[in-house]
Image (cartoon, rainbow, N blue to C red):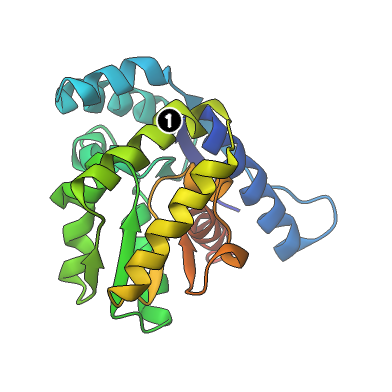
Amino acid sequence: MKTIGLLGGMSWESTVTYYTRINELMNQQLGGLHSAKIKLASVDFEEIENYQAANEWEKSGAVLGKEAQQLEQAGADFLLICTNTMHKVAPQIAEYLTIPILHIADATIAELQAQQIKKVALLGTKYTMTQAFYKQKIIDSGIDVWIPNEATIETINQIIFAELCHGKILTESKEKFIEVIEEAIKSGAEGVILGCTEIGLLIQQADVAIPVFDTTEIHSQKAVEQALQNR
């Protein structure tokens, strides 16, 4: 079994889900008392978010790169960045490593293609929804991407940072997300990407009529598959 490196804390709420799901999935695969071999680094999200807000992405990349390097030195065979947004600096983090990064967007695209999705709604932080680092990967794979209007982008971003990152699950916020997804369906979306690792705390498949692609779950599944390759 390969050792999985988790670069987490962004936020710690979703990192808990990563740790739990990876171990559950590993046990489902192997049975008995098996669990995953994991090295975990958890950063102070306040520092990272301040760099995001100030558009100082290179500084956050340096912080995360050094943490990732320590995970490799501790014995990780490959790395997961446990957040969608900070994949913006994945190329910078990779410069600190000789081990591969299992990219969350690549894992998600593989699932979209497996279900033959042609147009997908992308919900996440404002950075993930509006910047090219994530969205363009999906477009380049031949899948159209729908995002909400500017006001709704700000509302979603506020819910993520002010509520979900603090573990607050509010009914009115859930209803807002469902309303946005219904708007996406009217615009032709065949699926919805929960493109922030916290959104899965709020929205599940049972809530909407189109396939839900929970990036935390998909990333966790791919991590277990990779850890068990050539076993």
Residue 195 vs residue 71, the one in the foreground: 195
* Res 169 seen here: yes
Vertical placement of 204 versus 187: above or below?
A: above
Residue 191 vs residue 216, the one in the foreground: 191
Residue 141 vs residue 63, the one in the foreground: 141
Residue drawn at x 46%, y 44% is: 197
Residue drawn at x 85%, y 56% is: 32
* Callout 1: SS: loop
| Amino acid residing under circle 1 | Met
Quarter of the figure with the C terminus:
bottom right
Instruction: Estimate how packed mark 1 is, as few (under 14), some (14 to 19) or many (20 or more) residues with alpha carbons within 10 Å.
Output: many
125 relative to 91 in the view: left or right: right
Residue 149 at what x, y percent from top left?
A: 21, 52
Quadrant of res 19: top right
Residue drawn at x 40%, y 29% is: 161
Q: Residue furthest bottom?
A: 116
Vertical placement of 67 versus 227: above or below?
A: above
**Residue named by callout 1:** 10
